[in-house]
Amino acid sequence: MLLTTSIARTYLRLAHGYAQRDLAEATLKEREKILQLTQQRVAAQIDSKMELKQAEAALPATRSAIASFNELIALTEAQLAQLVGEGPDWGMAISRPRLNLSTPVSLPSNIPAELIGRRPDLVAQRWRVEAASEDIKVAKAQFYPNVSLTAFMGFQSLGLPDLLTAGSRVIGVGPAISLPIFDGGRLRGNLAARQAEYDIAVEQYNGNLIAAVHDVVNQLTSMKWLREQIDEQHQALILAQEAFELSTNRYKSGVGNYLQVLSAESLVLTQKRLQVEQEARGRELTVDLIRALGGGYVPEESTEQ
């Protein structure tokens, strides 16, 4: 489960890297248009060379960001190859993930409680409880004599004192004679130890179960509030884009200035980056919810367009 979750999260990071690069490339095209517009304004003596240098400086900075995202993509592909036990060449052949990252985060309408029981950590702990329970049965069984009376055939001279010696064993025709009932102190100690181990195993299981429930609830809580964040951020992006269009139009008409355009563009970029981050986090939360439920949960398809 841990390996599967790591692969899924790494694949999502790869998709996120591509989304970040897409945003940077779109920003580069937009800044190239602003540079052309600034060059026209400088030629018309509306702007100075200072505005021109600012517009020119934005291009290499954006290209540098694109290069950093290409590095991130390459390293993530190599990490995926390592996780699946393949060489670096395998990672270079990975196609771009085709995930609909803009799909709204969907809260599950119903999660059966028994799904938590499929978690590997709970299954392993439950096995420990069952094993400890079996150990108690074995310890209790040792209180009863395991004697084959046929072992005494032909050995009538066997004395009672020898028979009552603690832990005595006599080899006869049948299996070895064991009379543990006469060694109750040691056996009671053994039984008490087994019962203590069982109590500890049960306590650990209960603790893990409570932690698992909290894990699931935490994922659901994060998904709920992330959905609200995405809705509010979407409105913020719409308003930022409208402000950018207004400032760009004013700049084209010679009324506005480059600083207004730069400020509006910065706000749009901030909102778009936040949108990419929130969409990626929504996918990661879905993976974490599947992990928290032991892999038994299948996300519902969103009905929203």
Image (cartoon, rainbow, N blue to C red):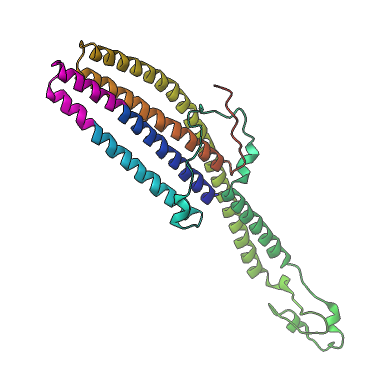
Q: Main secondary structure of the magenta part?
A: helix
Lateral position of residue 255 relative to residue 273, left or right: left
Q: Where is residue 39 in the image (x, y as percent from the top left)?
A: 19, 23
Q: Position of residue 199 (x, y in %)?
A: 59, 53
Name which residue lies at 40% across and 44% down: 73
Residue 138 within the segment the image draws in magenta: no
Q: Write down the quadrant of residue 257 in the picture.
A: top left
Name which residue lies at 41% across and 31% down: 276
Q: Where is residue 22 in the image (x, y as percent from the top left)?
A: 39, 33
Lateral position of residue 202 relative to residue 258, left or right: right
Number of marks in the rendered image:
0
| Above/below status of 1 relative to 158 | above
Please tell me which residue lies in front, 240 or 113. 240
Magenta range:
30-58
Q: Where is residue 269 in the image (x, y as percent from the top left)?
A: 32, 26
Please tell me which residue lies in front, 72 or 171. 72
Lateral position of residue 274 relative to residue 6, left or right: left
